[in-house]
Image: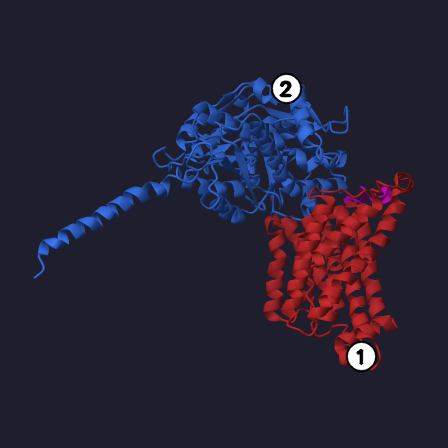
Amino acid sequence: MDWLLALLPHLVNGISLGLLFALIALGFMLIVGVMETINLAHGSLFALGMYAALFLLAPKLGWFPELQAGYMSLPVGTRYAIALFFAPILVGVFGLLLELCLRRTYGKDPLYGLLLTFGAALVIEELIRVTWGSNEQQMALPPTISGAFMMGDLMYSRYRVFASGFAILAIVALWLFLEKTPYGAIIKAGAHDSEMVRALGIHLGRLRSAVFALGVALAAIAGVVMAPIWGIRPHVGVDAVVPAFLIIVLGGVGSLWGAVIAGLLVGLVVGLTGAYASEWSLMSMYLLFIAVVTFRSRGLFGKKSVLDT
Amino acid sequence: MTPPRASLPRRRLIRGTAALAAGFAGPWGIHHAWAQARAKKPLLIGLATDDTGQYAASGQDEQRGMRMAIAEANERGGVLGRRLDVVHADTAGDPAVAAPVAERLIRQQEVAFLMGGVHSGVASAMSKVAQAHGCIYFNTNSSSPTEAGKDCHRTKFVWDGNGTNFSTSVVKGAMTGFGRDWVLITSDYTWGRNTARGIRGIVEGNGGRIVEELVVPQNTPDFSAVLNKVRAIKPGVIATAVGGDDLTLLRRQVRENSMDRGFGWINNQQDWPDVYGLGREALFGIFGTTWYWGLGLAGVPEFVARYQRTQGDYRIKVPGNVFYNGYMATRELLRAIERTASTNNLKLIKELETLRIPALDRMQHHDAYMYPQTHQLQQTIYMAAYNDRPRRSDDLFRILGRLQPQEVEDRASTQQCSLESYAATPSYEP
């Protein structure tokens, strides 16, 4: 039993990590699954979400000092909630602009979309660097979700519990949206047979814009949630885009639950190797990827995509 | 019939031409005197710094230090009557990028000297290229013990304290304060591994015990598993050999888990750009440094004033150890050129090998000197912690003590370093 008790904190940590990985992969999954575009700017948009939240949490409004002082007098918790809600919307609007550029690549060689989003990733990262500088930034957190708490002999970070809970909420909300609303049905239908959707009088261009903006907003949500854990720096997106890509391939392209389960698997593997063979912790996710893809090239749930139902 | 003797002059002509070509081209292969040959031509200094990547904050900071020293020299009329020009390249903190960057700066840009490097892999890669050409290279801020140990070169000079120097200064104090059971968190690359090895040697040499060494990959975004493990082990002291953004991230997650209390944290070295402006949340434990703006020594206020005058637009409002190293290294290079009245690499190397800098001149407590066997500058090492009673917002460090260069000497490096002979070092005279 002792070994199980010793293992427990690592399992809990692995699941928490997995939920966060799944959250990071959601937006990527949506865009790849519905639009068949590999959005290499996902990581940079994730970072942009962090910076947008940073701005909303402590805006520097040089021309309006009184407005700034008034806003800053709001409790940190209120400003954090504002940042969590509005930062993804701001970045989602930015995503709409990016989608305008992406339109020209629809129906062409997928390489064009790949190159465009890769270029966008570089531009966004550089924009961040020019606007906020390249140094590390810190995000203030409400005291209620800061620090750690004890549960029996185990100590947990309050923020990780909050972030994991938030990830579960985001996953469920996205599932409900895709499965239980007419908008979700249109999105899925658009992915399945775009010509038919067009024939039914639905504007395909707008549908694609909306999906892309939603995917980008999800990337930004993940960024805001991960900011206090990973820190805020211009190149942090690289840490997000690689596991996101790996998770959606592992889970099966376009599968929501595939991405969630793959995220949990990756989290558990990274968490356990981090505890017992720490030098392998990053490598372990790639080994898992190779092992799964070798035997099942379409990923774990490649066939059971929500888009295929 | 054509007389046979006509072929003799032709052979002679061919041989003569070949000999002439060899005589002319030979030195071109190893002497770069032709490259920036004539006096009064600007002296081109190559700054190859880690402007992006894991050590971006420090890379940019040290570059500012180098540029300030160069600008000051130019204000005085340059060096040996030659203006100083700068060519700059970003190594991206990546050894695979750094080697071609160094090659390009030396071969294509024809720089006179090469400087920079925070990441030890970057410094090592650039120094190999510099040695192959005979170009003097200053490692300004990379502190892996291997830099002046097994990876030392005749053309390379190391200006920062190394991991062993810093460890020696902080380990002994921590042993009495926090206990003898230690855990090491080590970054999985040259600097991390070698620094951890140094810490292990010092801890065990002083009767301590390394209970576990947790090696983490570079650019690890999440330390939670490692911190869980540490919590389970319950050591007295946790010593980290983790640098740059990784250290900032580790600190953030240690604090997030409320593990900054209840353990003794030893951070081998704390670079100023990594913590400036981050406040108390980012800084805990005991760490080493080579310089602090609040040392209260003569010359420091003037240096800070010069910094603030020239770097007014910069986010860091007072200089730190990384800027200082970049500035001091560049200043000493230019002074060495003045003293030898030459830019010949071998003359300069010999001059730098006997370098001794008075404490007052370096704004440290003890004289610094270049160790000729390893080419590492031996200098005062300070132990510091977060200052909970700051005089102003920039007053982040509380200096706990200092050690003379002899007290923190890295003897292992001396044994591992084997400098190339002067004869085996290509001549290079910009």
Residue A260 shows in this picture: no
What colour has chain A?
red
Q: Which amino acid does the dot numbered 1 rest on?
A: Arg
- Residues in magenta? A142-155
Which chain letter matches label 2? Answer: B
Image-based side of B360 in relation to B14, left or right:
right
Q: Residues within 10 Å of mark 2 (few under 14, many from 20)?
A: few
What is the quadrant of residue B382 in the picture?
top right
What residue is disc 2 on? Answer: B299
| Residue A168, percent from left and from top | 81, 59
Which mark, residue A198? 1
Q: Secondary structure at mark 1?
A: helix
Residue B42 shows in this picture: yes
| Residue B337, percent from left and from top | 47, 27
| Residue A34, percent from left and from top | 75, 71
Above or below — where is B213 with respect to A286?
above
